[in-house]
Every structure is written in C-alpha cells, then in structure tokens.
C-alpha cells in the first residue's frame, strides 16, 4: 500500500467504550489511518473542511434517519469523499436508503475484517495505482441444456482462485436463469433492483446488490419474479457490466441465446465469447448459426471460442468435425462426467469443493487459466474424415 486511507469516524454514540471498540474494529485493516472522530453535524463539516480525509465512516445507529440526512449534506458538500455506512440493522430498505443517500459501501456491525477489506478495495486499488486487465467473458450455449450455467459457475470459481478479489458472475438468463439455484443461493437483491432504481447506478450500489460467496464469486442474480423482466433496461445492463469490469479482475456472464437488446449489449462488450456446444447434429448446426450471426453483427471472429462440452470418445462426431464446420479452432473440450456434475447440481456445491479431481473441474480450471493469461490461441483442427454422410447432415462450414 502506497498510501494510508485517511479516515474520519462519525458516531452519535459518545460512550468511550463504544468508540474504542469501533476504532479497534477499523484499524485492524492495515490501510486505515484514523485522523479524527466527531459526534455532531457541524463538527463533521468543519472537520472535513480542514483535514485531508479520504474516507468517512458513518455509524447510522441508533437513529439512522438523522444520520442519513447528514450523509446527504456531506455528499452535496464533498462529492468526491468515499463513505462507508455501519449499522446493526441489515434490512434491505435501510441498505438501499444509505446507498441512495450517498454511501459507497454498507457494512453490518460488528465489523468483519473481510467485509471491510472488500469495501475498501476501490480505495486501496486507487492508492496503489494498480492497473487491471479487463476480462468480460460471455458464455453462450448453442442449445438449451448444453451445460452453460454449470460452466459459468465453475469458471467464475476458478477465475476467482487466480485473482486477488471475487469474480463477478452475472445471470442474464432473465426469465429462467439458474445461477443462484446452482449455488443454493437465495439473494436479497437481484438485477431487477439495480435496473429499476430511480438513481444513477454506481459501483457501490452495484456491489451492494451482489452476493459474495465463500468461493469468492460475487453473484448478480436474475429477477425473482417474471414480471420484473419486462422492466430491465438494456442501457442499465451496459452500465452494470462496465462498472463490474472496472471493479473485478474477471466478469462471467451467463448469456441468453436470443439476439435481443440485452443479449447483444453483453456480447458487444465482451472481450471473449465461449460458444458452448455438444457433439450432436442439432447443437453443431445451432453453433454454426450463432457463429455466423455474431460475425454478421460485427464481432471479430477471433473473439469467438468454441467449447465442446460433454465430450465422449465413442461419439460419431469429433471436435475436428466441429472445427471444420465452424471454420475455426476448438478452444477447449470438456469431458462428460454426468454423475459428478449432476451431484454438484443437486446439492448446490461447486466442483472445486465437491469433486476437485474430477476431469470436468480440471478442464474448466484449464480454461480459466488460459483466459486469465490471455491465451486464446486455438490451433485450427482439421477433420481427417472424408466428406460423406456426416457432412451432408451438418452442411458446409461457416464462412468468415
């Protein structure tokens, strides 16, 4: 850390023991340097005007309404100041009210060091001058049931293991997405809360709407109710994805197959697209159509990376056939291990924790490593089979 985070604490509780405990919980983070602690509105304004404070920690208790009014005044006077709100109350309405009043992050007391570290990450990155490589990966299936959500969830976990911060995982299958179900997760907030808020979306509101799992995956779940889907604004989706790519080393998107405004928005912003297919005639035909469609929409072919899922060696169709008919290299092959993957789905446990030695997990980990290194080179596989019945089934290769 090149610089300390110069911190001011505001609390209306003047009890000395309470203040000491609060300060102790904050200074456990090595970047926190407490300059002062104040207990009244005017004293806070005077302090912020005199001292080089970069972070204000506002204790909302015991009367959140009055402190939220002070927060709004502080934001109006010092718009560049980072604010973290603390409270014993973790009700969603209070969290949203605090975000709308201007705080960057909300932490439930007692202050957990991991929560504090995540809240301070934007400030510590700015202080250290860290550069970040943007990795926005859209995972797109050629057909329903080809394993996209399983790949998304486990890919996000593997990418998170390679990074210093959680990997963001966004479920854009808005009607029937199952990312939250995969993790047996019941999120407090969803993508609908973000897209329907009347206020401008910023990094703090976005991060607060996500659920960070022990596996270091930050999930932004699909809307809980079908009727909410109609109100999801594609322009807000673009803002959310832009914010997430700035704040995370990697962002994985479970992407809808239809080329509507939301799907196209995500695909246009992607650094890479994993096109998932199986070794069946319908799946490969759909992959051809998707590949052609993406290229016609203006996506560079080198951004599109076919991934063969559920591969078995006794299949009459090979990855080489896929390469021939898509006219591009196959980026990765994931073997079939139905029982292991199904058990993970049934119990809501990722492969890394449930079956770390499974061939499926190892294949996805290899994909994550290549994405993290920026290694998208795919040696073009050419079929050694002669043209025959298979070629008549699949049709000619895609033309760039």
Image (spheres, rainbow, N blue to C red):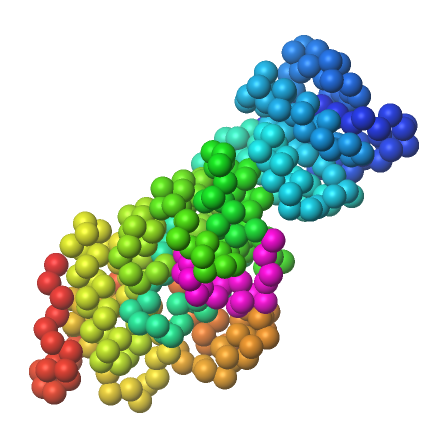
Residue 290 sits inside the magenta stretch: no
For image coordinates 52% across by 59% down, the residue present is 224
Q: Position of residue 145 (x, y in %)?
A: 38, 74
Q: Quadrant of the N terminus?
A: top right
Direction front: furthest residue: 227
Q: In this rendering, would 44 be left or right of 340?
A: right
* Magenta segment, prevailing SS (helix, strand or loop): loop
Region in magenta: 168-188
Say which of 43 and 215 sits in front: 43
Image quadrant where residue 348 sits: bottom right
For image coordinates 40% across by 42% down, the residue present is 236
Residue 148 shows in the view: yes
For image coordinates 21% across by 62% down, the residue present is 291
Q: Position of residue 192 (x, y in %)?
A: 48, 50
In the rendered view, tell whether residue 252 sits above or below residue 344.
Answer: above
Q: Position of residue 340 (x, y in %)?
A: 51, 80
Image quadrant where residue 88 sits: top right
């Amino acid at each position: 850390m090149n610089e300390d985070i110069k911190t001011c604490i505001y609390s209306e509780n003047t009890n000395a023991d309470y203040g000491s405990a609060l300060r102790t919980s904050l200074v456990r983070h090595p970047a926190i340097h407490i300059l002062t602690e104040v207990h009244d509105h005017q004293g806070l304004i005077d302090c912020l005007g005199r001292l080089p404070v970069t972070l204000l920690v506002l204790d909302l208790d015991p009367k959140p309404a009055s402190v939220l009014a002070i927060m709004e005044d502080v934001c109006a006077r010092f718009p560049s100041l980072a604010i973290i709100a603390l409270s014993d109350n973790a009700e969603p309405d209070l969290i949203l009210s605090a975000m709308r009043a201007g705080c960057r992050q909300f932490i439930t007391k007692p202050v957990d060091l991991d929560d504090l570290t995540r809240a301070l990450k934007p400030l510590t990155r700015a202080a250290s001058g860290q550069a970040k490589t943007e990795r926005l990966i859209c995972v797109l299936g050629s057909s329903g049931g080809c394993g996209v959500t399983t790949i998304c969830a486990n890919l996000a976990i593997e990418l998170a293991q390679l990074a210093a911060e959680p990997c963001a995982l966004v479920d854009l299958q808005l009607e029937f997405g199952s990312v939250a179900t995969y993790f047996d997760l019941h999120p407090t907030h969803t993508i609908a809360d973000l897209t329907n808020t009347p206020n401008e979306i910023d990094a703090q509101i976005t991060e607060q709407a996500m659920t960070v799992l022990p596996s270091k995956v930050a999930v932004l779940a699909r809307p809980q109710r079908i009727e909410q889907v109609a109100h999801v604004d594609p322009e807000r989706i673009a803002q959310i994805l832009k914010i997430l790519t700035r704040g995370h080393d990697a962002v994985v998107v479970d992407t809808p197959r239809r080329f509507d405004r939301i799907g196209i928005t995500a695909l246009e912003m992607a650094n890479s697209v994993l096109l998932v297919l199986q070794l069946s005639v319908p799946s490969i035909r759909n992959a051809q159509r998707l590949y052609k469609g993406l290229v016609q929409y203006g996506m560079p072919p080198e951004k599109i990376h076919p991934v063969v899922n559920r591969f078995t060696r006794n299949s009459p169709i090979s990855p080489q056939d896929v390469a021939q008919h898509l006219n591009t290299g196959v980026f990765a092959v994931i073997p079939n291990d139905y029982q292991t993957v199904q058990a993970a789905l049934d119990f809501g446990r990722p492969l890394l924790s449930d079956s770390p030695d499974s061939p499926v997990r190892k294949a996805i980990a290899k994909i994550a490593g290549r994405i993290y290194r920026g290694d998208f080179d795919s040696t073009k596989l050419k079929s050694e089979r002669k043209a025959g019945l298979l070629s008549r089934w699949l049709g000619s290769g895609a033309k760039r």
